[in-house]
Amino acid sequence: MEDAPTPSTRPRAAATPAAAAMDPVLLEIMRHKVEAIADELCLTLLRTSRSVFVNEAADFAVGMVDLEGQMFAWAPENKTTSINVPAAHTIRMLGALEPGDVIVTNDPYLSDSMATHLPDLHMIRPYFHGDRVVAYGWGFIHYMDVGGRVPGSISPYNKDIFEEGLRIPPMKLLRRGVMNADLEAIFKANSRLPDVNMADIKAMLGALEVGGRRVADTIEHYGVETFIASQKALKDYAYAKSREVLRLLPDGVYEHWEYLDDDLVTPIPIRLRLKMTVRDGLVHFDVTGTDPQVEAAYNIPTSGKLHNMLTRRIITFIHTHDPDIPLNAGTFRPLSITSPPGTVLNAEFPDACGVRFSTAIGFNDAVTGVLLKAAPEKMAGPTCGTGFVLIVDEPPEAIGEPPKVVFAQVARGGMSAYFGSDGVDARDVTMNTMYNHPLETVEAKCPIAFKRYDIRPDSGGPGRWRGGVGQIVTIEALRDNLSVRVGGADRLRFPPWGVFGGKPGLAAEIVIDIGTKREKRVGNIEQIVVDRGQTVTLLTPGAAGYGNPFERDPEAVRADVVQGFATREGARRDYGVAIDAALAIDTAATSRLRRAAARRKPGKGFEFGPERDAWERVFDDATMCELNRRLFALPKPARQTVRRRIFEATVGVLPRAGERSLVSALRNSGTLRAKLKRAIARELPSKSRKSPPAAER
């Protein structure tokens, strides 16, 4: 029997009602209908998946994409914020689709940055009405292992994407509802956890199937033309409301830059620079001046787009000031970007990108800086700036078996204070809202015991409004030769900075055998091998304080001490509040302490801490912008080599982040600045100056 004719997926010209003319009541009904469909996608996946990345940590997202490849229905239940998903390129690559087809890919470069690292497997299913595509179901899951050099597939030491695991170009996972058996076999052969991965794939396929049924129900009730028209109308509505929020930002140009501690391959910090221009609710980001791509996995593949990895903080700002805005791609329409190729924020093939989320967190703290400069009382300060992921690897029990990979825990720091409110403690949800795991579940799956899981007193940045405190997580090894990997570690060197008189939070620490004679701070390190009885402790950063801490209500300081967020010593040192042994305020001593503090002039801008201050006395903004301008005139392979030689000629070998302070290494700033200028002139003579690469706007 011959195959049935292939239906066309090209949308036919239809007399759909204009978005602006859609009845507001009907539009609101359609908004909640499509969001409910997306939510059902989300809950179906959550309930049927097997991996802890999904059913415990909720590292996935789902939604519906319109015929332009843009998100028009986002699930409010989603725990990540990948709303601006660039799906159009991947859909176009596959050409004509049929009912029951499902596209799959995990490749950042071949998907035009829809995927951002290989463990995130994206799937797209076309939804048909007759022979006509009316929308697409979309989703991704973070898979615990897709091959590569290390268990779990993520290592900062990977130099290119070929070391990071199996690359799947956009292709059909299902064809007319039938699984691509060849792709399934290749995928399973390249994973250390094939059964768990395949179970999650089937859970996603089930969720996308449910979404298709609900789309059909909605069309049956409201009509296909209304369903399609609502997609554009909802995006237009989100655009108008988002632009209105962005008018809270005064017109002007605002600049800020942020740092990652280092890239692990070298101890040199990575600088992320942002200039924000605001004009009547239209916001333009320019990241020119950001450092070149690194020979490690910290690069973000964005294809020069205004990618969701770069916009999460400003989207949070928009939805904080108007929670009623629909969650869709229209929110991004007032935003634009200039992003030169070849920076860590616009990686080029084959740059490694497994740890791209650490860079995204750092860049979004730069967004925090420009928003605070534009609207000081409408934006919180920087959050903890990192999210530790604890992974435990066990060797295989028998020859021929893969190693056991257990995603043990997520350790978060605090959220920043803002004008009028303290920060949230030990729970940073500004970039995503992944859950922590029940400790008993983790202990049942791998040979570790949690010895401490607590808040970290005095870690929140002191301020009139206190920054949220971090966490203390201590695990004990229950067997010898246990491999513990800490992913995403940052803020061991540069703590979250204080705001308008507030102080920085405490920096992160990683400590082996804390409280013993063998205690050792290891700084930013990928893998720690410990024997039975040894411990690994993660101390996550506290977030920024806001305002002069000596203006904090003494009763609020006392409450912090009672609840364990601050110590009596911290209350006296940081706030000038004396708390006696009975946990009552010593009024006389407090008055003396605060009178003495009043003689010190409080800060007005941002307080970065001694390490960043020392760094920028040598490596100032103007010099770093000029250095990067000259580096981009070089061929891409030469940039990091020359950059490294310049830094080594200036300061020699820098201490590793978290092991020793930068301050002593940068003490003679005048001498070092002179050495820096000579090194730049020698390595990058002015006659070689050229314009930086053209940027996509």
Image (tube, rainbow, N blue to C red):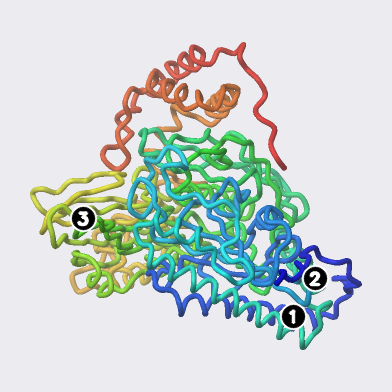
Q: Which residue is mark 2?
A: 233
Q: Which mark is residue 30?
A: 1
Q: Earlier in the sequence, mark 3 or mark 2?
A: 2
Q: Amino acid at mark 2?
A: Ala
Task: Say which quarter of the image contains residue 230.
Answer: bottom right
Any part of residue 594 in sight: no
Q: Is residue 224 above or below residue 471?
A: below
Determine contact: label 3, label 2, CB under 8 Å: no
Residue placed most toward the observer, 336 or 148: 148
Residue 116 horizontal/vertical position (percent): 53, 51
Q: Visible in this render: residue 136?
A: yes
In the picture, the disc for residue 102 is none
* Disc 1: CA contacts within 10 A as few (<14), some (14-19) or many (>=20): many
Q: Quick one: label 3 or label 1, which is nearer the N terminus?
A: 1
Q: Position of residue 447 (x, y in %)?
A: 19, 64
Q: Earlier in the sequence, mark 1 or mark 2?
A: 1
**What residue is rendered at 27% in x and 72% in y?**
439
Residue under the point 80% across and 70% down: 233
Observer-side mark, 3 or 1, equals 3
Q: Which residue is mark 3?
A: 399
